[in-house]
Amino acid sequence: MKLSRQFTVLGSAIFCVVIFSLYLMLDHIDYSKNPNGERNQNGQLGILQDKIDHLERLLAENNEIIANIRDSVINLRETVKDGKMFPEGSMSQGNGELLPPAPALLPIHSEDCQFAARTYSKAADGVQMLDVYDLLSFDNPDGGVWKQGFDISYQDNEWDNEPLQVFVVPHSHNDPGWLKTFDDYYRDQTQHILNNMVVKLHEDSRRKMIWSEISYFSKWWDGIDEQKRDAVKRLIESGQLEVATGGWVMPDEANAHYFALIDQLVEGHQWLERNLGVKPKTGWAVDPFGHSPTQAYLLRQAGLSNMLIQRVHYSVKKHFASQKTLEFFWRQNWDQDSSSDILCHMMPFYSYDVPHTCGPDPKICCQFDFKRLPGGRISCPWRIPPQAITDNNIQERLPSTYHNSTCFPVYRLCFSLQAQFGTISDYFEALRKSTGMDPVGMNVGQLAFPVLSGDLFTYADRDDHYWSGYFTSRPFYKRLDRVLESHLRAAEVLYSLTLANIQKYGQPSDYPAVDNYKLLTEARRNLGLFQHHDAIAGTGKDWVVVDYGTRLYHSILNVKRVIVSSAHWLVLKDKPAYYHDPSNPFLQMDDVQPSQDNLWQKNQARTSMVTVYVTTPKVRVLDALGHVVRAQVSAVWNDASHAATDLSFVAQAAPLGLSVYQLMEGMEPRTEAAKYMFLQDGMKISVCCKVIHLGMTLKCPENISCLQKMRLKEDDSEFLVKVEFAWYGTTSNKDKSGAYLFLPDKEATIYSPSQPPVVRVTKGPLFSEVTTTFPHITQNLRLYNIHGVEGQSVEICNTVDIRGEINREIAMRITSDLNSKDRFFTDLNGYQVQPRKTMAKLPLQANFYPMTSMVYLQDSGTRLSLLTAQSLGAASLKSGQLEVIMDRRLNQDDNRGLGQGVLDNKITANSFRLLLEKRSSAEEETAPYSYPSLLSHMSFMYLNHPFISMAVSQRSDAPSLIPYSPLSASFPCDMHLVNLRAIQSKVWGGPSEQAALILHRKGFDCGFSNRNTGLLCTTTRGKIHLEKLLTDLKVKSISHVSLSLMHTHSSDANPQEISLKPMEIRTYRLQLS
């Protein structure tokens, strides 16, 4: 104790000396004078500001010295005292820092750079969609009866030698929410359709039917008796009923992230396996508004052999029809062999309804649509109504067969024909047989069809009606979707680890394993339901959107319960002391934090900013070793009802681990208050602010846009990067913008409000930010003073409120001096990046594409990436420029069936990271692929999967907590743990002892700096030795399975060593013990 006092006195003496010296130095600083020798007022203010800034810097340095002395004193105390600041056992293993410092140079294996750097070579028989877009003129001449096509004629003898095979595929398209909610549709229509299906199929064994959405099928199954269930199973066994795709829904392919696409597919397939023993073979997607190769890849990885798509740009359909290439193998852009190929059929005509599926002339097809008989709700718009078929007119109306020929009176045509009801897999099986391929298997054999690569966005169904509006519609719910994804993933992983740990301790537990599994299942299904192509797309009725949002919100609350109960078990030192009290949980995830925090981390070890609410600015933060952690307290500006303060500090957590931090009330030199400055002076900002941190410089000159330039501290190079906002209106034509369509009146006009903005500048030791408040937008630009991932980019948060507008859409525009020409890059479903080309021959709205995770521009030396926390529509209409539509308010329907505009806008916070990187890679301009840097991948993860903080009140009887670290090292930098998902038991409703381990090895470009990235990982050529990676758990069994666990693959030579190719997503059936 005597030694401690001596150190304290020494620290106080140093403090006094430093302060006295500061005042002496300031007193000797001369005042600047004007040329006349007179001091002007502005000069005095400037000098005063400089003196204050100088004093603040010296004080900050002094605080650092004092803090180091304090730490030394604390450490000395700990060596001589019996008690500890934390309960015994709460120390992390090892000495010194919680995590080792990040290497200055990120170690990347040279082989891991070869994938992105390889030379592009187009397949001889390949069709690249970028080339198709270059080729097409996108005109729209009248094609005759096939309006968007061309005249089709046949010769009577074309099928004399081989009959024309016709497969009539009965299906029922059931939207899990659109004009009605999911439950209302089920009650009013879907249950009756399914009941009727069972009756009608049993009446005639030649009849067939396909079904796709398991969300509806499972709800119906739960309500029918065993007799009807047995009847359904017989229909499936006989081949009369086929389940196509078998996902929870028929998902949107533009806005959905691949985590959610996989999750809804696994949920559907696992339900089928448990209840029907069915393994779908063919994908069926007739209604998503454009198609992504990501979905094709996921179906292939799940074990499906074929797929069918419908909504593709009418000019593309016409081109493929003229080339007779409506059937093709869809291959991923990045795939150099045929490992990702899946056989795909593109429907040729306008829609999947009867008038547009029986042939090219809809007025003839419509005459055989019984739903449109006179007196019904809908009719034939071609003014030739269907006729009920009777004994008197059957010869006239139906095809008659004689002399081995079938004649169609309405077509005035006879030819050899074989027609039957069939499922979609029946069709593909016949197609494969006719071309000598494997009829049912995954082995494609000799390719009988062309290979297509690329995506099928942006969709237009007629004229200039491009469906790029739904990329942004209802952005509030698109953001809510991403929040649930992140929390669900965290809950799944923590739950699976908790179950394995409970088995390890071999004792009964109060842990609510079954209740938590029910909550997880409900959350999976609500998230899956929202991936439906009228849900996440934002194209449902107002009350349907509210129903989706309510489901998402309740599921977020429920998975938080799973997270806190699982984390409670894992950090508790004395496991038998665990208790579960749902009314008063040990850990809490609410806004107001008590004194002790737990943090959960994802796959890689991470150093990141954490912000929590505290009730006093006098707070000390201690890590698990008892060291004081530097912190920043900031005002909470948007909540006047509570005397709360934001406390921010840099936290560390092990991979998949839980860290423990303690918040204690009391004065602390290392907890510093942020400083503020408010700026508003007529029509211009009166003071030029300059915020400098590790990697960037923001400059705010005298106009309304604060972000003007970015400077890379690495080489002090400066770039023009200007952020501003713009308005779009809607056309004055009859058809206007709506939930689906984007039909602007002209190019965007710059947002220029009549009132000057209020600017708040925040300066602090850990972060500084500029908050600019306009009438419709509050923009927050933040720079982190962190040696790590967060310190490499600018965080942008735009809180948008356009509820008072009429037919307007608001965009964020980023203008740079990069020479990107007409090329830019958007991701597809967060899985891969698709190069884009802005085309002058297309209307403005056609050059917008979906952005799920990122959009970037580049030239020979620089890349500018915008990473996003929600799906939105993006474009690059000029060289060096990016535009992102942030919200849309539209007063009318766009005549696509919704019957309303988009007027239910909410105040929505759109979050982004803006990353500027020096580039040295010589990526080919013609290559149809591109890859983010590792830093870009990680920045996206930090944005979308932030630390999850939980709090526990520090009571005198509080149990001891210990950090939890299940892994001995981080996952490789390019290896992402998509999910560790508990699998339901086949014998009861709770979890089994197995989990689905889903991994994705990301493709990345090595042509960027790997210095000072702050990453605590390396690359390992795609290899992970799982047993060595785990600390206290063992691998009891592991087997490689298909993506959704339907098929088991041949066992690997060493099942413990996992090996993935770049871009590969792979699933393992895992049991830990």
Image (spheres, rainbow, N blue to C red):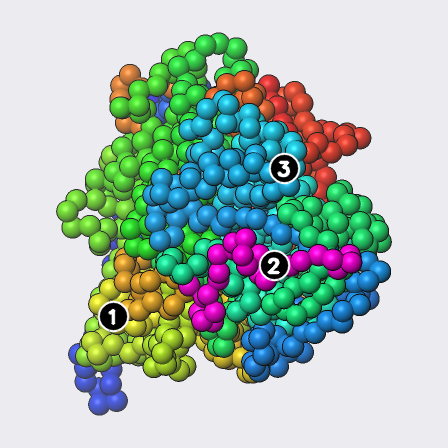
Q: CA distance from mark 3 to mark 2?
A: 24 Å
Which dot, 1 or 3, sits closer to the camera? Answer: 3
Task: Work out whether residue 1036 or residue 63 is closer to the camera in this orientation and state it.
Answer: 1036
Pointer 3: residues within 10 angstroms few (<14), some, or many (20+)?
Answer: few
- The magenta-colored residue range is 379-405
Q: Residue furthest bottom?
A: 36
Compared to residue 392, the image places residue 663 above or below, namely above
Q: Quadrant of the C terminus?
A: top right
Tell me which numbered mark, 1 or 3, is placed earlier along the sequence. Answer: 3
Tell me which numbered mark, 3 or 2, is placed earlier along the sequence. Answer: 3
Q: CA distance from mark 1 to mark 3?
A: 58 Å
- What amino acid does circle 1 point to? Glu
- Secondary structure at badge 2 equals helix
Compared to residue 834, the image places residue 542 above or below, namely above
Q: Residue furthest front?
A: 392
Residue at which label 2 appears: 395
Q: Is residue 399 magenta?
A: yes
Q: Quadrant of the N terminus?
A: top left
Side of 410 where 665 appears, left or right: left
Task: Work out whether residue 851 or residue 360 is closer to the camera in this orientation and state it.
Answer: 360
Q: Quadrant of residue 101?
A: top right
Which dot, 3 or 2, sits closer to the camera? Answer: 2
- What amino acid does circle 3 point to? Ser
Residue at which label 3 appears: 205
Residue displayed at 76% across by 69% down:
156
Residue 573 placement (x, y as % from top left) = 43, 18
Majority SS type along the magenta span: loop
- What amino acid does circle 2 point to? Gln
Residue 252 placement (x, y as % from top left) = 50, 54
Tell me which numbered mark, 1 or 2, is placed earlier along the sequence. Answer: 2
Side of 957 where 852 appears, left or right: right
How many marks on residues? 3
